Image: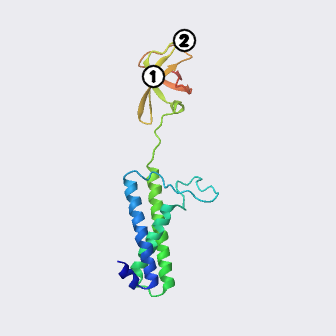
Amino acid sequence: MLEYLNQLEPSLRTLWYIAIPVSLIFLGQTIMTFFGGDATDGAVADFDSNLEGDMPFQLFTFRNLINFLLGFSWSGITFYHQINAMWLLVLVSFLVGVVFMLVFVFILMQVSKLAEDNSFVYHETIGKTAEVYLKIPAHKSGKGKVLISVKGSTHELDAYTEEEGIETGSLVTVIKADETGLLLVKK
């Protein structure tokens, strides 16, 4: 393999020297992604700047560098004998590298849209309708229980009322929720 590479023109040899290790790193990243070894990019910018903001991705990451170099090197190798002007070859390879990087960022953005936070927060019950599961005593004199559906999952929570008592099976509206999960409801 080294003999073959040493016989090539210097510019083509350089492209191969970029393509081989970058392809191996890309393969390793892909395997780690499928086996869960790469939950985050892991790259940290080495300068003081807020790159996170509202963007779900960072532009300057090791993964994006690998994607760019993958597109750059392999397109350069592919078009080396078709494009005679070196400046045009570098320009085409650069553009293909940018496209590789942008395609990956686009895919990452689409995948991040699939993520959904299904954690239960008591304040999300406010304004929702619930069914009384255990009778709720009148005028804050005790607690009953209600069944309420939030984000597709049903929760059994303690409830009280400031009004008349509410019988089992009645529908109520949640007025207030505190951090302990105690709900103020009305019929």
Q: Is residue 78 above or below residue 105?
A: below
Could you say which disc has been placed on residue 110 in the image?
Answer: none
Color scheme of the displayed model: rainbow
Type of the residue with mark 1: Val
Among numbered discs 1 and 2, the one appearing first in the sequence: 2
How far from the left and from the top, in percent, is residue 124?
52, 33
Could you say whether the residue bearing mark 1 is in a helix, strand or loop? strand
- State the residue position of label 2: 141
Direction right: furthest residue:
48
Give the vertical position of 118 relative to 73 (above or below). above
Residue assigned mark 1: 146
Residues at discs 1 and 2 in contact (Cβ within 8 Å): no
Q: CA distance from mark 1 to mark 2?
A: 16 Å
Q: Amino acid at mark 2?
A: Ser
Residue 162, horizontal then vertical, whole percent: 57, 17
For image coordinates 37% across by 54% down, the residue present is: 34
140 or 52, nearer to the observer: 52
Q: Quadrant of the N terminus?
A: bottom left
Kindly tell me whether residue 187 is visible in this rendering: no
Q: Quadrant of residue 167?
A: top left
Which residue occupies 41% across, 59% down?
29
150 relative to 33, above or below:
above
The residue drawn where x is 39% and y is 78% is: 78
Task: Tell me the quarter of the picture where residue 16 sits.
Answer: bottom left
The spot of residue 52 in percent (x, y) is 58, 54
- Residue at 37% across, 57% down: 31
- Would you say residue 46 is visible in this rendering? yes
